[in-house]
Image: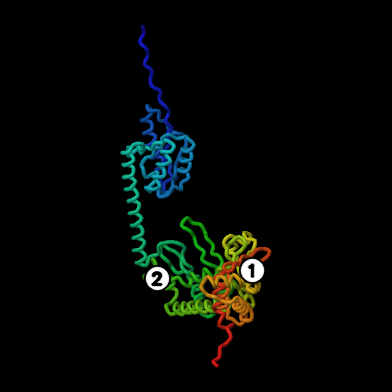
Amino acid sequence: MKAPKIQKPLVRKVRCAIYTRKSSEEGLDMEFNSLDAQRESCEAYIASQKAEGWLPLDDRYDDGGFSGGTLERPALKRLLADIENDRVDVVVVYKIDRLSRALMDFAKLVEVFDAHKVTFVSVTQSFNTTTSMGRLTLNILLSFAQFEREVIGERIRDKFAASRKRGMWMGGIPPLGYDVVERKLVVNPPEAELVRLIFRRYHDLGSATKLVQELAASGHRAKSWTTQDGKERQGGKIDKGFLYKLLANRTYLGEAVHKGVSYPGEHEALIDAATWDRVHELMAQNVRRKGSQSRETTPALLKGILFGPNGVALSPTHTRKKGRLYRYYVSQTAIKNGYQACPIKMLPAGEIETAVITQIRGLLRTPEIIVRTWKQAADDGERLPESEVTAALQSLDPLWDELFPAEQARILHLLVARATVAIDGVRIDLHADGIATLVADLRPATKPETRPC
């Protein structure tokens, strides 16, 4: 009788995805680069496990020029998608931090691996993530990787701060009036003259709007510059935002600013301290004057209580044309998302305020409101005859036009909880307790004067 043949155990194929990453793009154009070296080591490791059924996938998951501090990497996203579609059994990397340098991010990746029964192998750091010891080792290594990354970040920030304190230029878009030569700010004579002109003319005109118009008429534009990779960036139109930013830039005083603190710079100043002080004193005066004029000439009676049909607030705004003031209430939806996003985009302030006031005057004369106010006063412990409540509310009509705008606004906010504008009209929601308070304010004027006998 022949002895039975011993059959070899079946070896299941283990699909291995090799992931490689390099933080910078430097050297990626070489025939054999860092990504190739990582892949070669991973392929050699997979070949050593051939007896276990390990086979490398043909797909390449290479992220060249991507930081390990984020998961927003195209090849990594492709790898995760293939894992979720059950196309991968093992993820092989040269070193742990090729996948991530952030502990929290790596924890998210491990959760995805576990959910789809995918194991993780590092060629130079042998451990298995399916065991508790492997997880402990992984967390320790990642903690050190994150610690190293944070230390590097601190060193860079400290170096940047130290360089700024020494007055060095640390990169970015060069300000108008300067060019960057060998990492230093060098005066650009034509642009420097434009900067001086802007400071001088703002002081003469006292108006940013007029100065912007004057600069546009003369054809002046913002800074044109060249990026580090040689791309040309043309300067745009000079608007008020650019103008105020320029006037507040202490670089023109020959200073370098870091976190709000100024230090003497290595570059040449374009503006003297006396000119700077005169311009900024004028800017401060304009801010105070505009704030005062806005409060006096543009009373927003319905500010905070006017809403559109979509429940979004309508905010007060104003403009001047040929010396005349025009006031409006504009939908916040229109401001944020464009005028096409709101059925009611803008309302003339005078018209909507008149409509609300007229409706309130009518409501205050209705028996329903008079009775409600009388009951509210009684609930508050104020026993008033109904006739006295009626007289107090009706006395508001002749008084209204004699009140200052601030007092009109106070009364409206006292009476109105919410005014909702619809296509077909305005709906007013009143404060019952506010009406009772108003009656208390008006009662002394309605009481008959008592004279001694």
Nearest the camera: 42 or 402?
402
The Cα atoms of the two marked residues, 1 and 2, are separated by 47 Å
- The tag on residue 255 is 2
Q: Position of residue 264 (x, y in %)?
A: 37, 71
Q: Position of residue 380 (x, y in %)?
A: 51, 72
Q: Position of residue 287 (x, y in %)?
A: 50, 76
Q: Quadrant of residue 375?
A: bottom right
Q: Quadrant of the N terminus?
A: top left
Q: Which residue lies at the image location 63% right of the left edge and 75% below the top edge?
A: 321
- The tag on residue 49 is none
* Amino acid type at mark 2: Glu
Q: Residues within 10 Å of mark 2 (few under 14, many from 20)?
A: many
Q: Which residue lies at the image location 61% right of the left edge and 75% below the top edge?
A: 320
Nearest the camera: 423 or 22?
423
Indicate the secondary structure of the residue bearing disc 2.
Answer: strand
Nearer the observer: mark 1 or 2; the answer is 1
Indicate the secondary structure of the residue bearing disc 1.
Answer: strand
